[in-house]
Amino acid sequence: MSRYVLVHGSWHDGAAWTDVADHLEKLGHEAHFPTMAGHGKDVPRDVDHGDCVASVVDYITEHELTDIVLVGHSFGGSVIARVAERIPEKIRRLVFWNAFIPVDGTSVLDNAPPAYQELFPILAAQSDDNTVMLPFEVWRDAFIGDADLDRARETYDMLVPEPLGPTVEKLDLSEFYRIMPTIPRSYVLCHDDSALPPGDPQYGYLANARRLGVFRLVTLEGSHEVLFTNPALLASKLGLAGRD
């Protein structure tokens, strides 16, 4: 049995993991899925990256969790990297699922393709609270292309605006890269995810994964949002990624 803490990505809250957590528990694991600060419905969006990190650290501390497999999806990869800086003694393994692992001193958005670097500040400027909401067309094709149209619309309605601040904040990850070799690491890669260009040597997922040095690679079919389209498969792959 492993104890998983599942950290969501942009536009999501912890509830996005509900089905995956159910399948992990059927496999005999324990699963937690906190919601980061600034995320979820009807909450203040004026947060920075440190607030997101602190909310996950606080959840782990308050629930007295140790020996955890800490999973980060997408933007959540940058968060679990900084959580590892704060509480490395509580982490058994880090698992990055189609996740950002930013270069030290850069922002998450710096590590995204130029199209997103241009689009996100425009969308934030059009909002009244400096947040970004994905256009449905981008969600449909780039993020959840393995869903039919009805499921794509259903899941789009679950999304919440994403605070721009944590995405553009330059992150000091020097401590993460210093301690990283002491923590086992896995990268879970969905083959059908076009949210980042597949195979892109600068902005693709494998470009992020290679920053981990020596790591376990687990692959599966599915989009960036396979937690909605095939949660049982993702749970089984997280089991492989998290095992000793």
Image: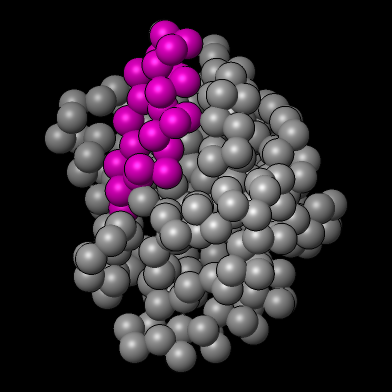
Looking at the image, is 31 positioned above or below residue 114?
A: above
Residue 20 at x, y = what percent?
A: 47, 29
Instruction: Tell me how the rendering is colored.
Output: one colour
Q: Is residue 195 magenta?
A: no
Residue 120 at x, y = what percent?
A: 55, 79
Q: Is residue 33 magenta?
A: yes
Furthest toward the front, the residue is 150
Residue 61 can be seen, yes or no: yes
Could you tell me which residue is drawn at 54 percent across and 12 percent down? 244
Q: Between residue 16 and residue 158, name the one nearer to us.
A: 158
Could you tell me which residue is drawn at 70 percent across and 39 percent down? 222
Could you tell me which residue is drawn at 22 percent across and 70 percent down? 44
Q: Between residue 112 and residue 183, name the one nearer to us.
A: 112
Could you tell me which residue is drawn at 22 percent across and 65 percent down? 43
Residue 38 at x, y = what percent?
A: 29, 63
Looking at the image, is 203 positioned above or below residue 170?
A: above
Looking at the image, is 86 positioned above or below residue 135?
A: above
Left-right relation of 46 to 94: left
Mark count? 0
Looking at the image, is 24 positioned above or below residue 37?
A: above
Left-right relation of 108 to 143: left
Left-right relation of 180 to 58: right
Q: Between residue 82 and residue 145, name the one nearer to us.
A: 145
Residue 133 at x, y = what percent?
A: 48, 73
Magenta segment, which residues? 14-36
Furthest toward the left, the residue is 62
The quarter of the picture where the N terminus appears is top left
Q: Quadrant of residue 236?
A: top right
Q: Quadrant of residue 45?
A: bottom left
Residue 210 can be seen, yes or no: no
Q: Between residue 116 and residue 137, name the one nearer to us.
A: 137
